[in-house]
Amino acid sequence: MRWMPDRWDNTMRNSLYICPALRRLSDLCNALAHPHPDWSLHEYDKMLCVAQKIAVVLDDEPRAAEMRALRDQFRDEAETTWAEIQRLSSYEHKLPPGKEWKPHHERLFVSFIRWDRVTGDPAAKTGIPEDLRAAVARWLSQEEDNSWV
């Protein structure tokens, strides 16, 4: 286990790593159940990494591999979604036939709009990329009925 010094025995591992890490698992459960637009992919990955390391410390190789696979899948899906959003936001006017925003894109955009309303302007505070904010603006301009906004 490269990330823990060899001189530590199981008792040290349990007391110094497992107990705090187990408390952090509730963060992972909450984050997966209630995703928030200001949490970055890196923050989600750190939480999944904690779960993976717990499995490693407990010598549960199948669960460790499962957590690694979840981390990889999460990253791949996020990168795919980001590429889709960038591609669709590159159209200057209405999207061409056959090209449309997917429901998860729209849910993301709506969550950003609501977050903006609640907090004022979180982009400067939370590091929301400017091109994502531009994609939200583009989506709003392409919506036929955005009176709900």
Image (cartoon, helix red, strand yellow):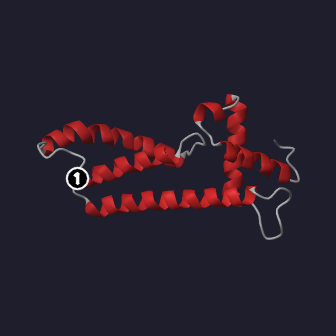
- Residue 95 position (above or below residue 13): below
Amino acid beneath label 1: Leu
Residue 131 coordinates in the image, percent (x, y): 68, 46
* x 70%, y 35%: residue: 116
Residue 82 image position (x, y, % from top left) = 62, 56
Q: Position of residue 109 (x, y in %)?
A: 70, 48
Residue shown at the point (29%, 49%) measured from the top left? 54
Q: Quadrant of residue 59?
A: bottom left
Front one among 43 and 14? 43
**Left or right, 122 with reference to 31:** right
Q: Is residue 111 left or right of residue 96?
A: left
Q: Is residue 65 above or below residue 34?
A: below
Residue 8 relative to residue 73: left or right? left
Task: Report which residue position mark 1 lands on.
Answer: 58
Quarter holding the C terminus? top right
Question: Which of the 4 quarters of the picture holds residue 87?
Answer: bottom right
